[in-house]
Amino acid sequence: GAGVSQSPRYKVAKRGQDVALRCDPISGHVSLFWYQQALGQGPEFLTYFQNEAQLDKSGLPSDRFFAERPEGSVSTLKIQRTQQEDSAVYLCASSLELGGFGEQYFGPGTRLTVT
Amino acid sequence: AQKITQTQPGMFVQEKEAVTLDCTYDTSDPSYGLFWYKQPSSGEMIFLIYQGSYDQQNATEGRYSLNFQKARKSANLVISASQLGDSAMYFCAMREGGSNSGYALNFGKGTSLLVTP
């Protein structure tokens, strides 16, 4: 069955470049989350969408990070003027439940390396 | 302040033995949920088990059980009859339920489990 998919799986960007990371959640899942996972650490919450509404963006580390989910399905995480500290795996998760109390189904992640 | 603490960076267990992975949490919210996820070397996060703060019984899912001690704020994962395929990183996570808590799932730093033959 179709799980959460993310693209690209790997991205190398030169410092200062903009990147866009895509997430295709499981069909029908209203909740969508983005996380950042640095090497050797647990995932850190970035932002949450309920359908197309971005209800929580408290975890976005700076105004260089922007996320959208315009039609309540596919989501894009955009990072402008990438910095070396942005190097991490970016995980997307979706859930049938509202608000994050239910099981979250994670995608395989996008590994971003900023050189 | 760290909301989830996993004090064991690495654990070893022999195949077929049981192992306990520790997790303590910090919240003043009476409503919360606790999760365990497994992350193999391939990178995907796999949901294992969930415990709600108001659940009366400890959660169980197959070989996984959660030893929930609310007064001690601990939610240890017990894996029985370990298999080689259980070798992975294990993350404990919490979702607080209060109206000001946001929607974040807060993860610990993880425990690396190695199952030996």
Image: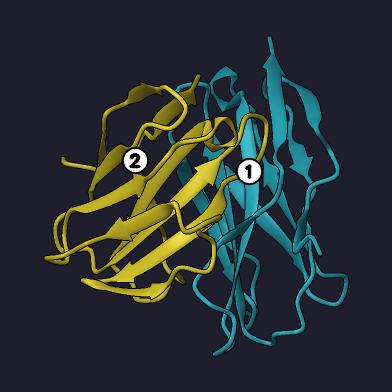
Q: What is the tally of numbered marks visible in this picture?
A: 2
Looking at the image, which is closer to me, B18 or A67?
A67
Position of B1 with respect to B100 (left or right) is: right
- Name the residue beneath numbered marker 2: A107
Q: Percent from the top left, x then y, of residue A58?
A: 53, 69
Check the rendered structure and report the hue given to chain A.
Answer: yellow
Position of B94 with respect to B3 (left or right) is: left
Amino acid residing under circle 1: Gly
Label 2 SS: loop
For the C terminus of chain B, give its image quadrant.
top right
**Chain identifier matching the cyan colour in the rendered picture:** B
Report in which chain the residue with disc 1 lies.
A
Per the rendering, the mark at residue B53 is none
* Residue B49 vertical position relative to residue A48 in the rendered view, above or below: above
To which quarter of the image does residue B91 belong? top right
Report in which chain the residue with disc 2 lies.
A
Position of B8 with respect to A63 (left or right) is: right
Residue found 28% across the figure and 40% down from its top: A20
Amino acid residing under circle 2: Gly
Q: Are marks 1 and 2 on the same chain?
A: yes
The crowd level at tag 2 (other Cα within 10 Å; few <14, some 14-19, many 20+) is many
Q: Percent from the top left, x then y, of residue B113?
A: 70, 27
Looking at the image, which is closer to me, B63 or A11?
A11
- Name the residue beneath numbered marker 1: A42
Does the residue at mark 1 contact the one at mark 2 (Cβ under 8 Å)?
Answer: no
